[in-house]
Image: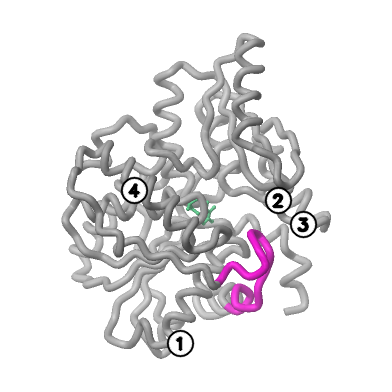
Amino acid sequence: MIGDRFPRVALGHLPTPLERAPRLSEWLDGPEIWIKRDDCTGLASGGNKTRKLEFLLADALRQDADTLVTIGAVQSNHVRQTAAAAARCGLACHALLETEVPCEEVSYTRSGNILLDGLFACGIEYHARGTDMNALARERVESLRAQGRRPYLIPVGGSNGTGALAYVACAEELAGQFADMDLVVSRIVHATGSGGTQAGLLAGFHAAGRDVGIVGISVSANESEQLEKVRALTADTLDRLGVHRPLPESAIQVREDFIGDGYGLPTAAMREAVEQCARLEGLLLDPVYSGKAMAGLIDMVRTGELSAGNTVVFLHTGGSAGLFAYDWFFSGG
Ligand SMILES: *Cc1c(COP(=O)(O)O)cnc(C)c1O
């Protein structure tokens, strides 16, 4: 398997289940919906970053690193899983958090993911919105090195060519599940942020010569920015895999209509998606990523883009720990 050609450390509960969502499908009166449960990867309440960290940690350990340095928003699922992975591997973790979401609710600043970061003894520093976080992270790597530490820098979302390999492996996992369950899947829908999930899936299915439509619902960047991010990362990933057939430009599909007022800011469509998945399937989505992605899927059904007779897979990338930072939005609903 392509995903096994590269070093990885076992961190997740894999493979994750692929489950039918019959009551959600019936409510929408549209396609048959299946949920790929990457919210169940196991590490510190799970999520898609755990898969990427299996490859990133292997690289860090190979370089004999003793400290992970990474970047995220205050309620970053990526930072939470990175801090847990560091703890599990006996490394320190230092996170630079950008106060990107203008929210001063105590639950947002203290609970949810940020509470868990503290449990993992992750070092935290805060920076104002708009700070050049990449430059600052490189500086932090240098200052740690000057103190005699051996830092390893993980980019935002764990999205580089190494992290994206994890979703090549996930594409292989899905292809196997589709075959075992006799599923003909017309579309995979998921939240796209730093782009590694979508790039890995695109590269993985392309490498296997399989044609599955993958739709990334953007949670922050506009369509053209997100397309460019995913395109560059997919090319890098295919390069690492030694696949030289280029991916057709049209294979990269991104939707920008579900972001609302910005990253991490709630929308009415997200509320509907989170509440309906909870009430119909006992399934927890999150306010920042999977809730907006499911809002996108619901819209694709309502506009007739996905209809009865189709089978669609929603890749649930996790994030439910973030619900506790948004009690002020959900309570009373
Ligand atoms: C990070 C994250 C995403 C986005 O994945 P990318 O690989 O960064 O595009 C989606 N959902 C959740 C819950 C996440 O934490």
Q: Does the residue at mark 1 contact the one at mark 2 (Cβ under 8 Å)?
A: no
Could you tell me residue 292's position as x and y percent? 56, 68
Q: Quadrant of the C terminus?
A: bottom right
Looking at the rendered structure, the kind of residue marked 3 is Pro
Q: Give me the disc on residue 234.
A: 4
**Residue matched to label 2:** 100
Distance of mark 2 from mark 3, alpha carbons? 6 Å
Looking at the rendered structure, the kind of residue marked 1 is Arg
Q: In the structure shown, which secondary structural element does the residue marked by tag 2 occupy?
A: loop
Q: Is residue 221 above or below residue 159?
A: below
Could you tell me residue 61's position as x and y percent? 44, 22
Q: Nearer the viewer, mark 1 or mark 2?
A: 2
First in sequence, mark 4 or 1: give its number.
Answer: 4
In which quadrant of the rendered view does residue 258 lie? Answer: bottom right
Distance of mark 4 from mark 1, alpha carbons? 30 Å
- Residue range corresponding to the magenta coloring: 258-272
Q: Quadrant of the N terminus?
A: top left
The structure residue drawn at horizontal position 75% and vertical position 65%, both measured from the top left corner, is: 327
Distance of mark 3 from mark 1, alpha carbons? 32 Å
The secondary structure that dominates the magenta segment is loop
Distance of mark 4 from mark 3, alpha carbons? 32 Å
**Residue matched to label 1:** 302
Disc 1 crowd rating (10 Å Cα; few below 14, some 14-19, many 20+) is some
Q: Nearer the viewer, mark 4 or mark 1?
A: 4
The structure residue drawn at horizontal position 20% and vertical position 43%, both measured from the top left corner, is: 243
Q: In the structure shown, which secondary structural element does the residue marked by tag 3 occupy?
A: loop
In which quadrant of the rendered view does residue 19 lie? Answer: bottom left
